[in-house]
Image (tube, grey):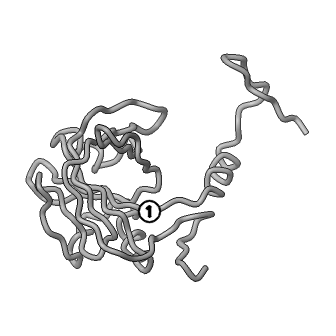
């Protein structure tokens, strides 16, 4: 079938098909977050992300991956802080709004409050975690941003789940 196993730095016989890679990665169910911060003019910016994880309890560190071309990534790099808004089941429309390319008025109808460093906390999120940028690591066409948690606002509820190109709720 042409499969090649990779050991160490051994070369792969055939490059991976990007569509097959996307399909395989999409088979993994993940939570959905919106990363927010402010641009150089102090205006809120944000984007939907499913590449997010806890890294360390002591100190409290998390990671999020943002595309090099992302306006939010550039704003986080400049400001040095961001907020992770963990979305609740039923916030799929909000996730889609912040995932769309080129939207400049994403926050027009979204209720927000400023976090401890000013990054927007989104109303109705299961949790909002204010972070200071701890480190940034280039990785392919994305950067891995490590954030140090400074403040948490949390509420009970079920998370929004993303898998195979769609949002799933607790009943799915």
Q: Residue furthest right?
A: 1
Is disc 1 placed on a helix, strand or loop?
A: loop
Q: Residue furthest left?
A: 41
Relative to 115, 93 lies left or right? right
**Location of the C terminus (image quadrant):** bottom right
**Residue 66 appears in the rendering:** no
Query: What is the total number of numbered labels drawn onto the structure image?
Result: 1
Quadrant in the picture for residue 111? bottom left
Relative to 93, 112 lies left or right? left
Residue 27: image location, x then y, percent: 66, 57
Residue at horizontal 91 percent and vertical 39 percent from the top: 1
**Residue 31 appears in the rendering:** yes
Residue at horizontal 14 percent and vertical 68 percent from the top: 113
Query: Eyeballing the image, is 113 above or below 144?
Result: below
Q: Which residue is mark 1?
A: 32
Query: Eyeballing the image, is 4 above or below 114?
Result: above
Residue 78: image location, x then y, percent: 17, 39
Query: Eyeballing the image, is 75 above or below 122?
Result: above
Q: Residue furthest top?
A: 9
Quadrant in the picture for residue 89? bottom left
Residue at horizontal 42 percent and vertical 56 percent from the top: 49
Mark 1 Cα-neighbour bin, 10 Å: few <14, some 14–19, many ≥20: many
Residue 72: image location, x then y, percent: 28, 50
Front-most of residues 15 and 92: 92
Residue 60: image location, x then y, percent: 30, 43
């Amino acid at each position: 079938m042409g499969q090649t196993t990779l050991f160490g730095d051994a070369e792969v016989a055939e490059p991976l098909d990007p569509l097959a890679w996307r399909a395989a990665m999409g088979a993994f169910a993940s939570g959905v977050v919106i990363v927010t911060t402010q641009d150089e003019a102090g205006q809120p910016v944000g984007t939907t992300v499913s590449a997010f994880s806890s890294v360390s309890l002591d100190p409290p560190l998390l990671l999020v991956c943002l595309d090099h071309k992302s306006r939010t990534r550039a704003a986080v790099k400049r400001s040095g802080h961001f907020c992770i808004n963990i979305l609740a089941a039923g916030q799929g429309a909000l996730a889609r709004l912040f995932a769309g390319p080129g939207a400049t008025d994403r926050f027009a109808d979204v209720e927000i409050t400023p976090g401890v460093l000013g990054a927007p906390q989104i109303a109705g999120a299961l949790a909002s975690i204010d972070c200071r940028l701890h480190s940034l690591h280039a990785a392919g066409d994305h950067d891995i941003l490590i954030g140090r948690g400074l403040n948490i606002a949390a509420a009970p509820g079920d998370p929004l789940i993303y898998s195979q190109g769609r949002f799933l709720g607790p009943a799915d």
